[in-house]
Image (cartoon, rainbow, N blue to C red):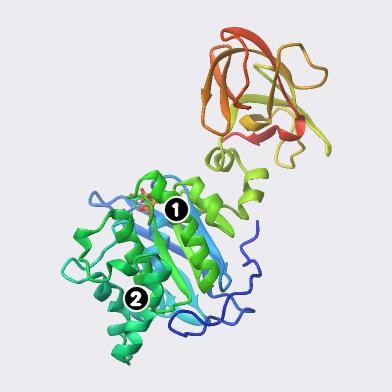
Amino acid sequence: MTTEPITKTPMTTTTAGWSAAAPDQPLLAIQGLRKQFTRANGQIVTAVDDISLSIAPGEFIVLLGPSGCGKTTLLRCIGGLESASEGTIEINGQPMFSAELGIDIPTRRRGISMVFQSYALWPNMTVFDNIAFPLKSRRRGISKAETATAVEEIARVVGIADLLTQYPHHISGGQQQRVALARALVDGNALVLFDEPLSNVDAKVRKDLRVELASLQGKYGFAAVYVTHDQEDAMELADRIVVLDGGRIAQVGAPQDIYQNPSSSYVAAFVGSSNSLPGTVTSATPTAVTLESAFGTVSARPSDDVEPGQAVDVMFRPQHVRIHTERPVGENTWRMCLRKIMHAGTHAEAVLTHDHNIYQARVEVDFDAPLDTDVWVQVAPRHVFAFPQG
Ligand SMILES: Nc1ncnc2c1ncn2[C@@H]1O[C@H](COP(=O)(O)OP(=O)(O)OP(=O)(O)O)[C@@H](O)[C@H]1O
């Protein structure tokens, strides 16, 4: 597993003309970070558990995982809203936090911007003043004219130039989030933290904002740490996804890499959809894993993590399932009953059952076969994973 940053050349200046980090050093370096909370009943929760991660200038990192896996706590530690219990955080080579050395630089001096799910706009300020706020609160302020230029530029880029005199409660949720985005970007900080910023807007606006966010990042070159439990956000936005499980890193990698080579059944189930059933390994060689399951003998791709006799989760993705009405030649050919076809616009999902268990296969929109009849299902061994159980 790599926790090193990918190489990507960011722009070295941003909206307000600040310099980003040198491309050859990580913008953000986290070492051995741990955060424990004590609940009201005295129970200790380890929300972040020994996380080490480096992020390159201009890199877009998504922290992905189910509720309670520690995404927000990790983000809040980076932002200085939470003090970790152990470990270090450096931004641009400068220590921001060290439990050992007692360093804990306040949020406003970390050189970061934040965008929250709740927008967190000032209700009594116009859109203009909300966006201008970070510039006005700088210790060495900039002139009124420079502020106006910066605000107008970023408002134009995020598509809210006509709303500058409005108050937050007079504009839509999607527009409010654009204001929050503009406020985060106007200062030109090289690192922007996002905490589920799209979860309060409807699906269409979410999609639009996601595309705009990606293009803004391309334009301004800021690095991002983006928290979400939405795998579409993660797949579309991330240079690298960090999948968290119980406060620990389960896997780090480029979206396609994680999708195609998940390291565990936890990751396979969370990134992309998958079918799964239990099995027992009968042989494991450098070229193949063979196992017994409710489907009979199954051939899976090779894995260093399993050995004969081991109980495993057998997993395969719906888009790798082929459905045939006549028995095809080859391995991993199973008889299933076709129960339903669910249409989803560009494709369709066939719902199949075997021994009362449900499996899914992605099919063409025009796929047609009689329901409640038996079909043959085939999955190439290279698309079948065998993961140790647990
Ligand atoms: N202030 C707190 N006091 C006690 N426990 C906390 C506190 N904040 C978070 N936790 C616990 O730490 C763990 C991680 O929480 P965190 O909010 O970071 O998860 P998350 O992945 O962001 O979840 P969600 O997606 O639901 O926001 C959870 O078990 C949570 O209950």
Which percent across, then down, holds residue 64? 49, 51
Residue 19 in the image: above or below residue 82: below
- Asked whether, in this view, residue 339 is left or right of residue 165, the answer is right
Most extreme residue toward the front, as rendered?
Answer: 162
Residue bearing the label numbered 2: 107
Secondary structure of residue under mark 1: helix
Q: In this orientation, which residue lies closer to the viewer: 126 or 237?
A: 126
Name the disc covering residue 70, or none. none
Q: Is residue 136 left or right of residue 157?
A: left
| Closer to the camera in the image, 56 or 321 | 321
User: Residue 208 shows which numbered tag?
Assistant: 1
Question: 12 above or below 350?
Answer: below
Q: Nearer the viewer, mark 1 or mark 2?
A: 1
Residue 384 drawn at (x, y percent)? 70, 32
Which one is nearer the viewer's eye here, 294 or 311?
Answer: 294
Is 38 drawn above or below residue 338 in the view shown?
A: below
Q: Say whether residue 316 is visible.
A: no
Q: Earlier in the sequence, mark 1 or mark 2?
A: 2
Q: Quadrant of residue 329?
A: top right
